[in-house]
């Protein structure tokens, strides 16, 4: 409460936080007993700062004299200032010295006393002339460090660091000018580091500090002509200044490269940390896909695009429907698995190719070779391995920040005293920063003031019954939808097997399964919200976590059925669907699912946010707007990212599609949130929200995708007529064949072959290594 009282008296916070400041109690209730002013004086005396101790003693006397700064006043903001004449203050000086200061009894630490003595509420009466006089004395003391320092009693009252002067008149203009000139002269005689340190410590505006620095540098140039400075020294100074300016310009440029910085600040200021966590998570997913796109594009797509395989004469024409189905014209491009060749790319070989399956028969030259199957295998494996490292590191870092900082008891004090950035000078930035801090303080106060209501036994039994009924409805509806997807996918597989004509590969009926799944993903979360309204959770954060759990149950169940459909039905028996390349068919399915998920997300934004806001305002004549559903939107992001990770093996350019989707989704969601949504009626701080998102992305999403991709590469037989792994029993044998070729060319590398057979081919060591990691 003490910190909030001080914060509410600050100019940037006064108007914004007056409504959030609760009744205050005595600082005795605050945790932590610290040292008093006497300990600070003792520390300064031990360090040789005798005069600083004298100044602090005077400062303490003036604090004892003021009624505004004692503890009873801090606990009672309505207390009026009871001042008298200046003569009466001087008469009571010695009497107040013997009184007990409540701050001394509290034993505050030296850092706390320094912060309190420099707060605007305690320095509001100090004139500009007094500040200049004070720092003129400090510069004199710094220059005469080895000499005896004059006592502070020898200076006039205006030259002391007074914190009283609420009724103090400003110095005259001539006196200020003379003090300013003396201060400039002293700053001129200081070293560069001491001058910068002194200017930074002055409680003046940035413009006045710049003016003092300019005057000091101007006098220094006039005193020391440039002709007396050696050329080498001038060149050294110019190089140092140029290097410093270049470094600051580089830092400013790197700071400007931060993606969506201003937009994220606006969202955080208006809607709080919960909605902000969604956009931060979207930004994280964008970087993951950008990394995956760079790796696959550099080592798989680009080499194959430079050396395209020889294809059959009959190719599909572009009709426009390919943008929705992903089939047709796109089937014969680098977008899908079936386009990639199974031979080593060499620049001098171009004729010895079998047109039927694109297999390289013979090539004499071995210069500039690129083994495409090996590159495909190791690129997918290394990209997943590096992504796993980044995810685990991000998760551990997020866990550390959540449970080390967010659980600290002093986070409210840090937010009050350390949040404001004094480099912010533009009015829009100041307003944005004030809204952001105000929202964060509301969330912190809501968390501090939250009280668990004690219910009776009957009320507890009633709530447990309602919760059990809600969970039963959610589980039953999820199971029913999963069963519908299972049956409909089997029906679509049989329908596709009857479509022998190749033109049916571009049939709009291929969109039926993605549309059904996307519709279920859109409909069921609304029913989950209805059951949560029936449960009536008191804590908004608990409501968010329960919604995340139910949506996660739905997404995992749907993805499990789809993975069984692709890997257990299509891949296990590709002759039923009569496709030459089942890998490309699965890649097209994943492309359609990703596209339909994006389209249904846009429909949800249109009907669930925009039209509902217009209906509420125009028809119902209510000013309420919909609240942004964090759980559903975040789980939609995780669902789409899981599809991207599953499809990178079959569709190497699927991360590029996901990048485009996330970019469009950010701007659409941001504008929709700012125009159509309102902040939560109960402000709450979701301290571990980002940690939960990263954890869900790592374990159910990435782990499940990695298991499916590993199972495909280790156990499922590839197609015999397409792709880089044709004529192999498994994709994994590409690495084994490469090791055998190395051993045949150089028998000394037989150790490498044995190590590969024991460490890589044996799944026991693989799972042990994954568990240790």
Image (cartoon, rainbow, N blue to C red):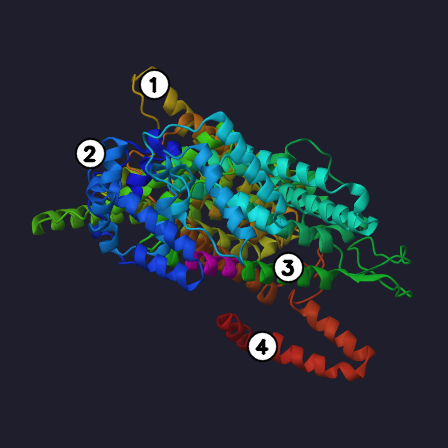
Identify the image quadrant of residue 570: bottom right
Residue contact at pointers 1 and 3, CB within 8 angstroms: no
- Say which element carries label 1: helix
Q: Is the magenta stretch mostly helix, strand or loop?
A: helix
- The magenta region covers 391-401
The Cα–Cα distance between marks 4 and 2, rounded to whole angstroms, is 79 Å
Tag 2 secondary structure? loop
CB contact under 8 Å: marks 4 and 2: no
Where residue 519 appears, as percent x and y from the top left, is: 43, 37
Task: Tell me how far mark 4 sits from mark 3, CA to CA.
Answer: 19 Å
Q: Position of residue 19 (x, y in %)?
A: 28, 31
Where is 658 relative to 349, above or below? above
369 or 53: nearer the viewer? 53
Q: Earlier in the sequence, mark 1 or mark 4?
A: 1
Report which residue position mark 4 lands on.
Answer: 762
Is residue 27 a member of the stretch shown in magenta?
A: no
The residue that label 2 is drawn on is: 79
| Residue 242 relative to residue 30: left or right | right
Q: Which of marks 4 and 2 is in front?
A: 2
Reading the chain from its start, which is encountered first: label 1 or label 2? 2
Q: Residue 617 carries which label?
A: 1
Tell me which label, 1 or 3, sits earlier in the chain.
3
Residue 251 horizontal side relative to residue 604, left or right = right
In the image, 164 versus 432, the foreground residue is 164
Q: Tag on residue 380?
A: 3
How many C-alpha atoms fall within 10 Å of the one at disc 3: few (<14), some, or many (≥20)?
A: some
Q: Which of 44 and 637 is in front in this view?
A: 44
Dot 4, how many residues are within 10 Å of its Cα: few (below 14), some (14-19), or many (20+)? few
């Amino acid at each position: 409460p003490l910190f909030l009282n001080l914060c509410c008296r600050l100019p940037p916070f006064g108007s914004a936080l007056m409504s959030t400041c609760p009744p205050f109690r005595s600082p005795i209730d605050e945790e932590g007993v610290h040292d008093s002013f006497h300990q600070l004086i003792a520390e300064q005396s031990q360090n040789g700062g005798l005069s600083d101790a004298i100044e602090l003693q005077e400062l303490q006397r003036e604090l004892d004299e003021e009624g505004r700064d004692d503890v009873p006043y801090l606990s009672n903001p309505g207390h009026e200032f009871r001042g008298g004449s200046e003569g009466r203050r001087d008469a009571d000086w010695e009497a107040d010295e013997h009184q007990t200061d409540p701050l001394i009894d509290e034993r505050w630490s030296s850092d706390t006393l320094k912060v309190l003595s420099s707060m605007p509420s305690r320095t509001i009466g100090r004139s500009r002339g007094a500040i200049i006089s004070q720092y003129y004395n400090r510069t004199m003391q710094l220059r005469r460090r080895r000499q005896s320092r004059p006592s502070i009693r020898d200076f006039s009252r205006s030259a002391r660091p007074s914190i009283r002067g609420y009724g103090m008149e400003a110095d005259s203009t001539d006196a200020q000018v003379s003090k300013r000139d003396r201060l400039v002269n002293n700053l001129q005689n200081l070293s560069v580091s001491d001058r910068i340190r002194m200017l930074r410590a002055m409680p003046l505006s940035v413009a006045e500090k710049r003016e003092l620095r300019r005057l000091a540098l101007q006098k220094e140039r006039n005193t020391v002509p440039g002709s007396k400075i050696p050329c080498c020294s001038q060149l050294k100074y110019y190089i140092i200044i140029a290097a410093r300016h270049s470094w600051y310009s580089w830092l400013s440029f790197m700071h400007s490269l931060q993606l969506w910085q201003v937009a994220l600040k606006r969202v955080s200021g208006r809607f709080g940390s919960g909605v902000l966590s969604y956009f931060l998570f979207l930004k994280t997913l964008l970087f993951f896909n950008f990394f995956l796109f760079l790796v696959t594009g550099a080592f798989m797509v680009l080499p194959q695009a430079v050396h395209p395989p020889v294809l059959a004469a009959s190719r599909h024409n572009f009709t426009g429907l390919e943008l929705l189905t992903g089939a047709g014209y796109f089937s014969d491009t680098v977008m899908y698995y079936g386009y990639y060749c199974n031979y080593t790319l060499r620049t001098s070989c171009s004729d010895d190719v079998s047109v039927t399956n694109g297999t390289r028969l013979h090539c004499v030259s071995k210069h500039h070779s690129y083994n495409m199957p090996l590159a495909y295998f190791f690129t997918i494996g290394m990209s997943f391995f590096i992504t796993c490292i980044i995810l685990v590191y991000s998760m551990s870092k997020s866990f550390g920040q959540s449970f080390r900082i967010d659980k600290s008891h002093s986070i409210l004090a840090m937010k009050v005293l350390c949040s404001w950035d004094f480099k912010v000078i533009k009015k829009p930035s100041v307003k944005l920063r004030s809204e952001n801090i105000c929202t964060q303080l509301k969330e912190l106060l809501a968390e501090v003031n939250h009280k668990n209501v004690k219910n009776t036994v009957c009320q507890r039994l009633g709530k447990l019954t309602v919760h059990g009924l809600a969970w039963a409805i959610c589980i039953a509806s999820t199971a029913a939808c999963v069963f519908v997807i299972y049956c409909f996918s089997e029906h679509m597989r049989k329908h596709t097997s009857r479509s022998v004509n190749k033109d049916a590969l571009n049939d709009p009926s291929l969109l039926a399964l993605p549309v059904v799944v996307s519709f279920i993903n859109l409909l069921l979360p609304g029913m989950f919200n209805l059951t949560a309204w029936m449960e009536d959770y008191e804590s908004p954060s608990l409501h968010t976590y329960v919604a995340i759990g139910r949506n996660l149950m739905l997404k995992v169940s749907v993805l499990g059925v789809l993975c069984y459909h692709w890997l257990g039905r299509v891949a296990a028996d590709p002759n039923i669907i009569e496709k030459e390349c089942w890998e490309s068919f699965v890649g097209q399915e994943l492309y359609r699912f990703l596209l339909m998920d994006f389209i249904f997300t846009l429909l949800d934004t249109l009907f669930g946010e925009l039209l509902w806001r217009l209906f509420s305002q125009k028809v119902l004549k209510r000013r309420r707007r919909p609240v942004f559903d964090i759980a559903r939107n975040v789980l939609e992001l995780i669902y789409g990212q899981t599809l991207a990770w599953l499809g990178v093996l079959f569709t190497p350019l699927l991360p590029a599609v996901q990048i485009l989707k996330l970019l469009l989704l950010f701007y659409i969601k941001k504008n929709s949130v700012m125009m159509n949504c309102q902040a939560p009626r109960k402000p709450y701080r979701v301290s571990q929200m980002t940690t939960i998102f990263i954890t869900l992305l790592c374990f159910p999403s990435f782990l499940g995708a990695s298991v499916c991709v590993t199972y495909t590469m280790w156990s499922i037989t590839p197609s015999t007529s397409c792709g880089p792994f044709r004529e192999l029993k498994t994709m994994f044998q590409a690495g084994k064949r490469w090791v055998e070729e190395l051993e045949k060319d150089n028998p000394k590398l037989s150790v490498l072959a044995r190590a590969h057979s024991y460490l890589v081919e044996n799944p026991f060591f693989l799972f042990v290594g994954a568990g240790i990691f």
